[in-house]
Image (tube, rainbow, N blue to C red):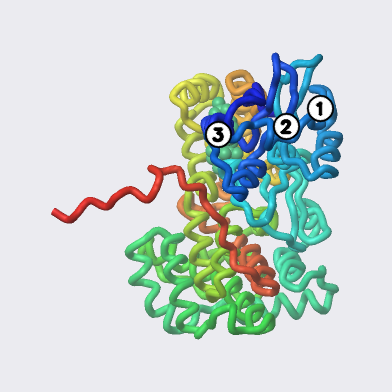
Amino acid sequence: MTSPAVTCAAGDSLAVAAQAMQGAETGSVVVTDDGKVVGILTERDLLRAAAAAGEPGLEIVRLWMTAWPDVLGPDERVDAAWASLTSHHYRHLPVVEGDRCIGVVSLRDLMGVARIRPAAETSGDVPAGLEGVVVAETTIGDVRGQQGFYHYRQYSAVELAETRSLEDVWSLLFRGELPDADAAASFAAEVRRRRAMPAGLSTLLPALARRGAPLDVLRTAVSLLGAELGWRPTHDIGADELADEAVGLCAVVPTILAAAYRLRQGEEPVEPHPDLGAAANYLYMLTGEEPSAPHARAIEQYMILTIDHGFNASTFTARVVTSTGADLAAAIVAAIGALSGPLHGGAPSRALDMLDAIGTPERADAYVRRALDNGERIMGFGHRVYKTDDPRSLLLRGVAEELGGPLVAFSQSVERTTVDVLAELKPGRHLYTNVEFYAGVVMHTCGIPREMFTPTFAAGRVIGWSTHVMEQASHNRLIRPAARYVGPPPPQPVSPAA
Ligand SMILES: CC(C)(COP(=O)(O)OP(=O)(O)OC[C@H]1O[C@@H](n2cnc3c(N)ncnc32)[C@H](O)[C@@H]1OP(=O)(O)O)[C@@H](O)C(=O)NCCC(=O)NCCS
């Protein structure tokens, strides 16, 4: 409820009541007599008076108010208030304790509790960052933050990462079902066929690679790819054409990234390997050497775990751009831009930088305390949705343990210290490692250079983005929210030009 209630006396003029409402920015005024409720006057009553051409300074409240309105007790349940308001078509009800008015409950208050609002109304209380706001329906997957669980289609993403290949999960996302052996083999073969860059792009790539970091190069390269392959607006093409573009895009992205990295190092790009699976081939194109089976599998599991993850910033961005009917390249370029920020995809290399800066386990406590004192964020910790262990982090920690090595033992020790210090200095915030912490450790251990951490994330995530582009395009509606204007009240006079 809103408390205290705005009140006036039955003998006051409508002008006095209207001023009280306006001053408190409320839609009603409770009419009291010696503290007891005798009526309620609402904006609707003021409108009725205005329509009757009454003079607000002369008309008195008693003639226009609803006398002896329904009231509520302070301990009544929200559904009782809701029933009372809706059955009488009221918008406001006084709340009374004893015989004193202590507040007003309005339809708007109740809609705030229920998190519903009239379709045409711009809501004032959407949380900053749209946290928890449902903006679409999807069959691709979901994240249950409180439970530490997420899924692709109807399957646990962690179980898929434990048991399936990247191509199988890719096929699940694109086609809606897990492939049987034949379908899996034919999908994997199609993807292999489409790994090579088109000629125009491979000609231009060296010039691009000299100028930017691999993720920036990818952003530009995807633009070029769309232009070179003549991708048309999603608005103008059918599902099959878009799906075909998406398979080609996701097949070639690792090739672009590996080539961009090697060219930047002054090395020749390595052609895709016809016999290797997607993750092993990516490592091969990056390093020029066939990876060991454990390394290839570790990176494959990392890529499966990060293919998709609800309506994160880059996925939402891809859907917003698709909703305009733009082509696949435009949506993916925008998503790459969103991913490039350190609060989204840029954390694994920063997490590893932090491990370097800490240096030895016994320095972790002081390092974290100093960082928090300075108001800094500890990279690789905390998550918008997970308020418990990030399931991706749990699996990757296990993968890291299997790979072994001094960095793994050190990072586990830093994790323990950091979680303890965060719990002490940020109580109640539920801060644990997110996917990025062990992602950095795993990628480093498998020989991926630090500047390729976020690009490697993109190499898998492009599959998730493309799935969302296809879903958005399949039943599209332009995404067009609203903002609340909070600047100086318009219209202000425009000063004449000097
Ligand atoms: C991912 C992230 C942006 C999510 O943040 P969010 O949902 O916006 O959470 P909030 O900013 O509301 O943080 C809630 C509280 O926890 C604190 N917090 C969150 N993550 C923190 C971190 N990594 N280190 C220290 N404090 C952190 C915030 O300071 C805030 O404290 P306050 O209540 O005293 O202001 C945030 O956890 C973060 O910046 N993490 C580090 C970057 C990172 O690892 N990104 C990769 C994500 S997969």
Above/below status of 433 relative to 280: above
Above/below status of 90 relative to 150: above
Would you identify the image quadrant in which residue 13 lies? top right
Of the image marks 3 and 1, the number of the one nearer the N terminus? 3
* The residue at label 3 has a CB less than 8 Å from ligand 1: no
Q: Is residue 187 left or right of residue 493?
A: right
Amino acid found under the numbered disc labelled 3: Leu
The kind of secondary structure element at disc 3 is loop
The kind of secondary structure element at disc 2 is strand
Query: Are the residues tagged 3 and 1 within 8 Å (C-beta)?
Result: no
- The residue that mark 1 highlights is 72
Q: Mark 2 and mark 1: span between their CA atoms?
A: 8 Å
Would you identify the image quadrant in which residue 415 lies? top right
Amino acid found under the numbered disc labelled 2: Val
Of the image marks 2 and 1, the number of the one nearer the N terminus? 1
Answer few, some or many: residues within 10 Å of disc 3's Cα (few below 14, many 20 plus, some between 14 and 19).
Answer: few
Can you give x and y, in whole percent of width and height, for residue 288 in the image? 51, 65
- The residue that mark 3 highlights is 58
- Foreground tag (2 vs 3): 3
Between 453 and 271, the one lying in front of the other is 453
Q: Which mark is residue 96?
A: none
Query: Are the residues tagged 2 and 1 within 8 Å (C-beta)?
Result: yes
Exactly how many numbered labels are in the figure? 3
Q: Mark 2 and mark 3: span between their CA atoms?
A: 29 Å
Answer few, some or many: residues within 10 Å of disc 2's Cα (few below 14, many 20 plus, some between 14 and 19).
Answer: many
Between 193 and 269, the one lying in front of the other is 193
Amino acid found under the numbered disc labelled 1: Leu
- The residue that mark 2 highlights is 105
Residue at left offset 55%, top offset 58%? 456
Can you give x and y, in whole percent of width and height, for residue 100 in the image? 75, 16
Above/below status of 69 relative to 150: above
Q: Mark 3 and mark 1: span between their CA atoms?
A: 32 Å
